[in-house]
């Protein structure tokens, strides 16, 4: 059977960093994200063909990338036939956003449908998590919490919709500091941090209350409260990276310049808060009213700024 699905990427407002189970991709901390449009991944799956073939953004995957997709498909059906996949992003892979979140969410939705299954969104999220942790948050639109869960098999560690796309018309501006492929993958960076940073225990201990704080801020549409906890979660995560051995440093000079600019904007009364992920790019959370002033300020340091809005859920085409 054939099926096609579309999913948006998300960025974490409260961060996922570290795993309590690498095999099942179970997180060390809960996290909370916002789904982002108009960026999206469109994935078509043919279940039952001559040979496995995975085409990602026009290039056929080989080696580790292909193995990762094949293992993911095996989770759907351990006795599956060969599968053909064509997946494309409508945004540059170097856009400064984790494309694995939309990729594995779209693949989970399209591949289960093509396999003749009808999983719930929660089951899809649990499946997508095993492809890439952040993908567990891309099945829903709006604001999503990825719960820590307690069961050893991970069936209670998945996304939960906190508020839909229509709840809050925010903007996220991506200041593109660098589009080079990073030297340390997020997976490698988080594993090294977890194994070597003396700050990691504090990170894990303080994570759950950040998610509670962010959920309350989202529900009450309190941008200052949400931005404050987002920056705190981000800087704690960066602190664990810097204190790893050897240190994991994704920042570039322009990253720091943008962070200072965001702080300066706030002192001028503009509601803007910054976050970063496993890379040098800075994402700025702001309102639709302030977005153009924030963009102008970011352009003093970077050439490319993507302006994104809150996106909707993943869906079958
Ligand atoms: C996040 N990041 O919450 C965090 C913040 C990067 C920093 O999720 O190993 O590609 O596939 O579960 O999801 C990036 O890591 O890692 C990420 P895996 P993933 O968005």
Image (cartoon, rainbow, N blue to C red):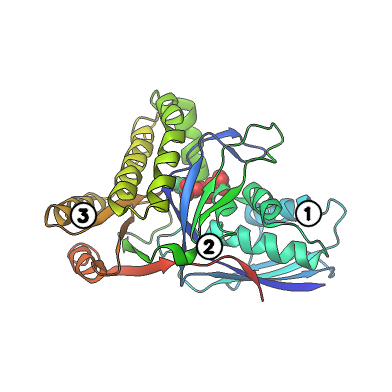
Q: Nearer the viewer, mark 2 or mark 1?
A: 2
Q: Residues within 10 Å of mark 1 (few under 14, many from 20)?
A: some
Judged from this view, the residue extending furthest toward the bottom is 317
Closer to the camera, 268 or 109? 268
> Residue 206: x percent and y percent?
41, 30
- Residue 1, position as x, y percentages in the image: 82, 72
87 sits to left or right of 222: right
Instruction: Name the residue beneath numbered marker 2.
Output: 141
Residue at left offset 32%, top offset 40%: 232
Asked if 227 appears above or below 38 in the picture, the reply is above
Callout 2 touching callout 3 (CB < 8 Å) = no
Residue 213: horizontal and vertical position, in percent?
Answer: 39, 41
Q: Dot 3: what SS?
A: helix
Label disc, if present, on residue 239 of the rendered structure: none
Q: Which residue is mark 1?
A: 76
Q: Which circle's residue, 3 or 1, is located before the other in the chain? A: 1
Residue 93 seen in render: no
What residue is shown with label 3?
Answer: 262
């Amino acid at each position: 059977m054939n099926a096609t699905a579309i999913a948006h990427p998300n960025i974490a407002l409260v961060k996922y960093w570290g795993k309590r189970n690498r095999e099942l991709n179970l997180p060390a901390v809960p996290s909370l994200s916002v789904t982002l449009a108009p960026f999206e991944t469109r994935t078509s799956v043919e279940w039952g063909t001559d040979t496995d073939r995975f085409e990602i953004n026009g290039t056929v995957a080989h080696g580790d990338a292909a193995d990762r997709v094949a293992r993911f498909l095996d989770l759907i059906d351990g006795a599956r036939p060969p599968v053909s996949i064509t997946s494309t992003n409508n945004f540059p892979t170097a856009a400064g956003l984790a494309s694995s979140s939309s990729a594995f969410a779209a693949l989970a939705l399209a591949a289960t449908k093509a396999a003749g299954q009808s999983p719930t969104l929660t089951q899809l999220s649990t499946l997508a998590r095993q492809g890439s942790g952040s993908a567990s948050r891309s099945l829903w639109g709006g604001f999503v919490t990825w719960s820590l869960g307690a069961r050893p098999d991970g069936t209670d560690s998945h996304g939960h919709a906190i508020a839909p796309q229509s709840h809050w018309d925010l903007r996220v501006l991506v200041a593109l500091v660098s589009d080079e492929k990073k030297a340390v993958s997020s997976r490698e960076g988080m594993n090294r941090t977890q194994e070597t940073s003396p700050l990691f225990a504090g990170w894990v201990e303080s994570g759950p209350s950040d998610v509670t704080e962010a959920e309350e801020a989202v529900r009450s549409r309190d941008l200052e409260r949400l931005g404050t906890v987002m920056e705190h979660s981000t800087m704690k995560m960066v602190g664990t990276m810097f204190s790893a051995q050897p240190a994991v440093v994704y920042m570039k000079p322009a990253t720091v310049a943008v962070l200072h600019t965001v702080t300066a904007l706030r002192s001028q009364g503009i509601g803007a808060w910054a976050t970063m992920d496993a890379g040098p790019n800075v994402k700025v959370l702001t309102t639709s009213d302030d977005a153009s002033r924030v963009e102008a300020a970011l352009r003093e340091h970077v050439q490319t700024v993507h302006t994104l809005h809150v996106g909707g859920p993943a869906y079958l085409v």
